[in-house]
Image (tube, grey):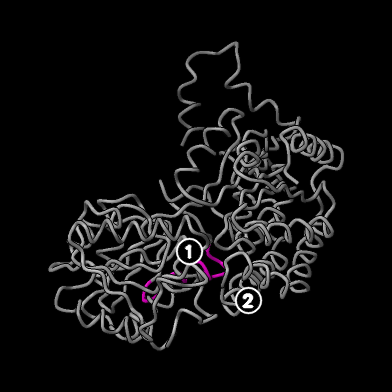
Amino acid sequence: MMSSFEEMNKVLSEQKDFFIKNGSPSVELRIDRLQRLKSLIMDNRYDFVDALNTDFGNRSNNASMLSDVYGIMPAINLAIKNVKKWSKPEKKSSNFPFGLLGAKSYVKYEPLGTVGMISPWNFPVNLTFVPLVSIFAAGNQVMHKPSEHTPVTSALLKDLCDKTYDQNEFATFLGGPDVGEAFTKLNFNHLLYTGGGEVAKHVMNAASQNLVPCTLELGGKSPVVIGKSADLKTSAKRIMFGKTMNAGQICLAPDYVIVHKDKKDDFIKETKDAVTEYFPDIKNNEDYTSIINQKHYDRLKNLLDDAVAKGANVDEINPANEDFSQQEFYKIPPTIVTNTTDDMKIMQDEIFGPILPVVEYEEIDEATKLINSKDRPLGLYYFGTDKKEEDNILNNTSSGGVTVNNVISHLQQNDLSFGGVGPSGMGRYKSFDGFKNFSNPRAYFKDVSFKLDKFFDAVRPPYKGNIEKVLQQLMK
């Protein structure tokens, strides 16, 4: 059943009233909500895996168990362990001389209220619950709009969350783009959107009508730079593991590779060996995930057709020489694209699939120039042991995060926050930074006692001459 604006707005009003009446939730209640989340996931993990497989047509059960079940646990455990510490007032220094006279300054992280959350289809469980950890830890309530592209998983999320949480804690609303559009017009205290940049513009525009602050987790073309000092075999294995996970339908997936021209052919050979090792066959291999639907399958095919029409070479890695023209699911084998040019859509748009352009360089500065010619990406990956070269690339580029000698792995580090920069996103979740992102850092100042009020006479009217000397002392 689809949700209406009026229905959603009623729940929002009830959540806001609940918050005003009950105030900031205790640390104990926050931990309880997180413990319930942990139980929800583990008790229903096989149902989640089955739902994901149904929605995708074929999605690796093992990969789902990794990403959408056990991959969420460290974030929950970290928050449970640290939420009490995170919630404590943060002491700050007070101006001279008032700090010496007993004045106190501190920041207290307080809940925002109700956070609206729009989650995507590519990791519909993980990208609902990992940010939810930060939102719950900060003491907020949640209204959630899951993706219509994974209807079975979305329905399961609603059913389980409705049973686990009171509607004033967590409410889920199903529906298509019309419901999503109405959802963005609600007067939340904060709105989190995870998805593509074009939709994000509409989300942010709608939110701006109510001055709702946004966290946007987007994507972009995350580059891989392979230095001459890199171990090509290991690099290829790590890159292709990240590229083939979820068939490349990951916001942090390596989007294109930049490698020295003398190493390019060897690198491509190693990618083929890696894929053959991971997937001796693909078409009926349950561990190789399908493209989510016909629309995205056609989009990826169009990227390849455009590249070929403009002179690119396309090398499909198909270890068992299978025929993919007739298939039950929307599978695309890992595909290497070379001889690319900047006017190809494949070098302009985020790929979000198992297609990997390989670009060559002669001097490493060419890699930096290529990266900087595009929007700032969500991730950037460097392979090599040359620290000077590594520093040169990372100091002269910008991205939401960096992994050296692997891909995506910075996302998996429990104590690192996750987010983009510029067109790849704004705001952060995970770890203490995520807790702060969904908190109001309320500034507190307690002035000196009433008995010391005479100290203010020097800067109060009626002024006795020029007070500049007093100000110079105070403003040191």
Highlighted magenta segment, given as a residue range? 404-416
Secondary structure beneath disc 2? Answer: helix
Residue appearing at x 56%, y 72% in the figure: 58
Above or below — where is 148 with respect to 31? Answer: above
Q: Main secondary structure of the magenta part?
A: loop
Q: Quadrant of residue 404?
A: bottom left
Question: From what the image shows, is residue 420 above or below residue 463?
Answer: below
Residue 355, above or below 99: below
Mark 1–mark 2 Cα distance, whole angstroms, equals 16 Å
**What residue appears at the point 60 percent right and 13 percent down from the top-left corner?**
461
Query: How far from the left and from the top, in percent, is residue 108?
Result: 68, 46
Residues at circles 1 and 2 in contact by the CB criterion of under 8 Å = no
Q: Nearer the viewer, residue 404 or 88?
A: 404
Q: Residue furthest top?
A: 462
Residue bearing the label numbered 1: 250
* Amino acid marked by disc 1: Ile
Numbered marks: total: 2
Check disc 2 and give the amino acid type.
Met
Depth order, front residue of 408/320: 320
Residue 393 at x, y percent in the picture: 26, 63
Residue 442, quarter of the rendered image: top right
Magenta segment includes 413: yes
- The one nearer the camera, 142 or 394, is 142
Q: Residue at x 79, y 46 (%)?
A: 24
Give coordinates of residue 463: x percent, y percent.
Answer: 56, 13
Residue 65, numbered circle: 2
Mark 1 is surrounded, within 10 Å at the Cα level, by few (under 14), some (14 to 19) or many (20 or more) other residues, namely many
Does residue 459 lie above or below 414 as drawn? above
* Residue 258 location, quadrant: bottom left
Is residue 422 within the magenta segment?
no
Chain-order first, disc 1 or disc 2: 2
